[in-house]
Image (cartoon, grey):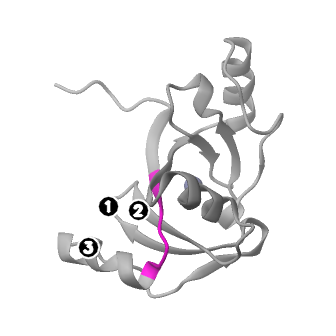
């Protein structure tokens, strides 16, 4: 039996793609349904498409809108694929402090405002075994 849900549950899996229009076909064939809107996140120079996986989690396709986008640089060096995994936490400031005290490295010294009004921070892949981990706290 699975243990009770903790203070850290899957929120989304973000996948770097060259083209949402091309890549969404596979996920649609798999049976997922995408929200019709495409959100452009100017600050990160990406276009996003969302498809729910379950009541908590979604798949997020990230397509670069600019050669200087970190997603474009990721695709240039590693190719298309999983970019990061995001966990939802109750208090991202407390979680950042707790994990920093345990020796884990974060991309930002303190959480920042992310898409949808969430406060987010990213754990450096060098301290997580090679996976970029996003921690996100929903707005109240
Ligand atoms: Zn994310």
Point out the residue furthest to the right here: 109
Total numbered labels = 3
Give residue 59's mark: 2
Q: Which residues are magenta?
A: 12-20
Is 75 rendered above or below residue 130?
Answer: below
Query: What is the distance, in whole Å, between disc 1 and disc 2 at their CAs?
Result: 7 Å
Residue at the image point whose x is 52% and y is 86% from the top: 37
Which of the 4 quarters of the picture holds residue 132?
Answer: top right
Q: Nearer the viewer, mark 3 or mark 1?
A: 3
Label 1 with label 2: CB-CB less than 8 Å: yes
Closest to the observer, 6 or 82 = 82
Q: Which quadrant does ligand 1 occupy?
A: bottom right
21 on left or right of 46: left
Where's residue 31, x and y in %? 20, 72
**Which residue position is annotated with label 1?**
53
**Which residue position is annotated with label 3?**
26
Residue at the image point whose x is 44% and y is 61% from the top: 80
Element at badge 3?
Answer: helix
Element at badge 2?
Answer: strand
Query: What is the distance, in whole Å, between disc 3 and disc 2 at their CAs?
Result: 12 Å
Is 91 rendered above or below residue 73?
Answer: above
Give residue 67's mark: none
Where's residue 99, x and y in %? 66, 20
Residue at the image point whose x is 32% and y is 27% from the top: 4
Point out the residue furthest to the front here: 77
Label 1: few (<14), some (14–19) or many (≥20) C-alpha neighbours in 10 Å = some
Is 130 rendered above or below residue 65?
Answer: above
14 on left or right of 24: right
Which one is earlier in the sequence, the residue at label 1 or at label 2?
1
């Amino acid at each position: 039996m699975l243990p009770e849900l903790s203070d850290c549950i899957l929120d989304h899996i973000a996948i770097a793609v060259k083209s949402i229009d091309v890549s969404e076909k596979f996920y649609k064939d798999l049976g997922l349904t995408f929200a019709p809107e495409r959100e452009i996140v100017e600050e990160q120079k990406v276009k996003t498409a969302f498809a729910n996986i379950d009541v908590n989690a979604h798949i997020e396709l990230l397509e670069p809108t600019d050669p200087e986008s970190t997603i474009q640089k990721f695709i240039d060096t590693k190719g298309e694929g999983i970019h990061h995994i995001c966990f939802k936490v109750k208090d991202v400031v407390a979680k950042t402090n707790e994990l920093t005290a345990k020796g884990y490295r974060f991309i930002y010294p303190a959480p920042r405002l992310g898409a949808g009004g969430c406060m987010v921070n990213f754990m450096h892949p060098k301290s997580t075994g090679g996976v970029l981990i996003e921690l996100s706290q929903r707005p109240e």
